[in-house]
Image (cartoon, rainbow, N blue to C red):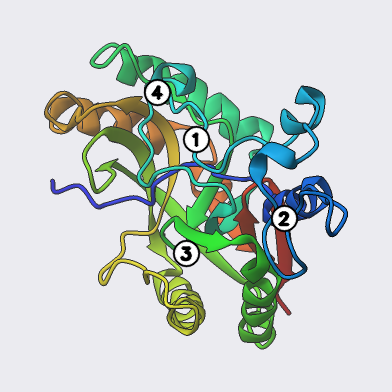
Amino acid sequence: MSAGPLVGYSSSGSEDEDEAEAEIEAATEGRTRPGAGGCRRGQSPDPSQRFPVPDSVLNMFPSSEERPEDDSAKHGGRVRTFPHERGNWATHVYLPYEAREEFLELLDLLLPHAQTYVPRLVRMEAFHLSLSQSVVLRHHWILPFVQALKDRMASFQRFFFTANRVKIYTNQEKTRTFVGLEVTSGHAECLDLVSEVDRVMEEFDLTTFYPDPSFHISLAWCVGDARPQLEGQCLQELQEILDEFEDSEMLLRVLTEQVRCKSGNKFFSMPLK
């Protein structure tokens, strides 16, 4: 079975310090009295005549050339799909899924079985259905972007979707593998939402969603391309576990009540009618 691509999960939240740096440069620029060995008005003072800036002040404003350490070992082996830069916010649009106790019980059956084939698999910390790829927004574009999304979502009605087919996915770079539940009903409604999200992406010159998406809820992930181990026999056994789970049909029928956008460490909710 071919594996569909998945959005890149990464976070790149930071705040701009450009204005603060400009203020400190202006505040610390030396001044000399005219005619006292200094410069004429309109000319820059000699650097040697400037008052020294205390180290405690300089350390408050790191050099613009510094970049945060990007050690994949600190993130479970995950590799960023784009470099971290100050002022860039990783942004993602999705349908949230609040896991009920019965869902977690099902996951407690599926994950250990999958781990017999790929022991490094780990459970997702949260569950959702993606409506966009992970894109980069500058900080000052976040609120206009969210408002554009709200305007597009305002006319959408709530709907049900069912995600009850086990499927294996990788991200585009094939650096991570996911065990997911593919949507088998409600696909058309999800496509309608993606169409409106894509329009907003185009307005902001951002990457749109995949042309033929396989909507799904990811359950677990691991580093690397583990499709050879998980597809085939393992996939068939996982599907059998799901099909035999009591009330799985109702459990995996999900009412969609809102669209959510995560940008850096900020969350924005757009209720459906």
Gap between marks 2 and 4 measured at Cα: 33 Å
Residue 178: quarter of image: top left
Residue 265: quarter of image: top right
Circle nearer the viewer, 4 or 3: 4
Give SS at disc 1. loop
What's under tag 3, amino acid-wise? Leu
Residue 92 in picture, x, y percent from top left: 53, 57
Gap between marks 4 and 1 measured at Cα: 15 Å
Circle nearer the viewer, 2 or 4: 2
Q: What residue does disc 2 label?
A: 22
Question: For the point 73% across and 58% down, which residue is it?
Answer: 39
- What is the crowding at mark 1: few (fewer than 14 residues within 10 Å), some, or many (at least 20)? few
Quick check: 201 above or below 31?
below
Residue 266 seen in this snapshot: yes
Q: What residue does disc 3 label?
A: 131
Gap between marks 2 and 1 measured at Cα: 19 Å
Instruction: Pick the residue in front: 202 or 190.
Output: 202
Mark sitting earlier along the chain (1/3): 1
- In the picture, the quarter occupied by the C terminus is bottom right
Question: For the point 72% across and 28% down, which residue is it?
Answer: 59
Give SS at disc 2. helix
Mark sitting earlier along the chain (2/4): 2
Quick check: 255 above or below 151?
above
- What is the crowding at mark 4: few (fewer than 14 residues within 10 Å), some, or many (at least 20)? few
Circle nearer the viewer, 4 or 1: 1
Mark sitting earlier along the chain (2/1): 2
Q: What residue does disc 4 label?
A: 72
Q: What residue does disc 1 label?
A: 67
Image side of residue 46 versus residue 71, left or right: right
